Image (cartoon, grey):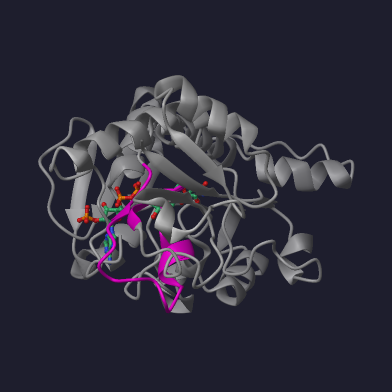
């Protein structure tokens, strides 16, 4: 019988158990801390932010399914057994959620909504006349599963969409593709609305520092829905206070929740969302996990296997 060891804090586990049982009625679903003992036999972990050392203490775990696309919540564990495969989430719910969030956010920044929220507090009628979408350059950092769906959500509006990745990609209609670190500065200099959809790796941490942010055109906007380690927040604050960066939406932060005394809470033209851009949905994720357990058991490679060298 397939055994799933589930870990997610502060959330009802019933919906996850019911979704998995709906797809695979025979599974043995065990919610932490009732995982049993390693002697109970082979199991798959399905987890978000497990306590460090927990995975290592269950040597019967054959593979770990991350509840999210990001795996930094797992790789920060110094005791994570290197031989256990890690499978990143890639369910359709996550993609649909990110497409909605990016489309909503790009439209809001294009149409000046963050500045209107600021002005409303001062009863200021100051009007904002937006450019046509065809004259707005949207640059997406990261062209993986989520960068692609974000681009697809934006092109119907007529935006000039470009994307940047580590490695080259096959051509995609209506999206200008760039790759490699030597293209980044030029990419930023030609982006009016920047969308961050990068994983947290040693190469992406602090990538948007003071100098790189200064390459964005005057009045640019930033949306970050990848990981909070991407941006130097002090530098972003300084660029927003000077007006160089007109507005931003941040969904992810180096420390979450963002501490209540953090100066970003009071910054004008900044929209803060509490890491909700794309939430894994139990129904689509259950299908994804069950499908990939079957692949592993047939000896096939699962989808979205973590490449430990790349870090995503
Ligand atoms: P993915 O399919 O692995 O795509 C990652 C993309 O980033 C790839 O295009 C990759 O380039 C690019 N990349 C990585 N390192 C790079 C570097 N040094 N320089 C240039 N490009 C680089 O991942 P995904 O499923 O799209 O998810 C992306 C991230 O979104 C996740 O890792 C997670 O942190 C975040 N996320 C956030 C939320 C939220 O609610 N805020 C929800 C889900 C996910 P190559 O294609 O060339 O490898
Ligand atoms: C959410 O942040 C995820 O990694 O899926």
Q: Is residue 207 left or right of residue 178?
A: right
Q: What residue appears at the point 49 percent right and 33 percent down from the top-left corner?
A: 97
- Residue 78 x, y percent position in the rendering: 43, 79
- The image shows residue 297, relative to residue 245, as above or below, that is above
| Magenta extent | 61-89
* Number of marks in the rendered image: 0
Q: Residue 230 in the image: x percent, y percent?
A: 45, 67
Residue 311 seen in the current view: yes
**Above or below: residue 211 compared with residue 278:** below
Q: Residue shown at 18%/30% (left/top)?
A: 173
The magenta stretch spans residue 79:
yes
Picture coordinates of residue 151, whole percent (x, y): 33, 36
User: Residue 84: which quarter of the image?
Assistant: bottom left
Name the quarter where the C terminus is drawn: bottom left
- Above-or-below relation of 147 to 194: above
Q: x, y percentage for residue 197? A: 40, 52
Front residue of 191 and 229: 229
Task: Indicate whether residue 268 is drawn in magenta.
Answer: no
Instruction: Please identify the quadrant where the N terminus is shown.
Output: top left
Residue 193 shows in this picture: no
Q: Residue at x 29, y 39 (%)?
A: 293
């Amino acid at each position: 019988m397939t055994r799933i060891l589930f870990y997610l804090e502060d959330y009802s586990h019933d919906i996850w158990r019911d979704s998995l049982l709906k797809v695979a009625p025979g599974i043995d679903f065990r919610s932490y801390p009732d995982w049993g003992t390693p002697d109970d036999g082979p199991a798959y972990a399905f987890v978000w932010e497990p306590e460090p050392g927990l995975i290592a203490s269950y040597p019967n775990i054959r593979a770990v399914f991350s509840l999210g696309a990001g795996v930094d919540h797992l790789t920060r564990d110094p005791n994570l057994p290197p031989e256990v495969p890690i499978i990143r989430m890639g369910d359709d719910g996550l993609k649909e959620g990110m497409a909605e969030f990016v489309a909503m956010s790009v439209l809001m920044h294009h149409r000046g909504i963050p500045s209107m929220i600021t002005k409303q507090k001062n009863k200021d009628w100051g009007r904002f006349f937006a450019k046509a979408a065809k004259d707005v350059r949207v640059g997406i950092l990261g062209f993986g599963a989520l960068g692609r769906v974000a681009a697809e959500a934006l092109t119907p509006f007529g935006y000039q969409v470009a994307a940047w990745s580590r490695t080259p990609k096959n051509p995609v209609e209506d999206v200008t593709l760039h790759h490699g670190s030597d293209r980044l500065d030029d990419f930023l200099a030609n982006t009016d609305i920047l969308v961050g959809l990068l994983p947290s790796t040693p190469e992406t941490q602090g990538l948007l520092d003071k100098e790189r942010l200064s390459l964005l055109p005057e009045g640019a906007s930033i949306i970050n829905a990848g990981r909070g380690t991407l941006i130097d927040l002090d530098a972003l604050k300084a660029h927003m206070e000077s007006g160089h960066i007109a507005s931003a939406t941040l969904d992810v932060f180096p420390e979450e929740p963002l501490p209540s005394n953090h100066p970003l809470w009071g910054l004008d033209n900044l929209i803060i969302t509490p890491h909700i851009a794309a939430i894994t949905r139990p129904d689509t994720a259950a299908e994804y996990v069950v499908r990939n357990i079957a692949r592993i058991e047939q000896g096939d490679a699962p989808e979205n296997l973590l490449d430990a060298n790349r870090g995503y």
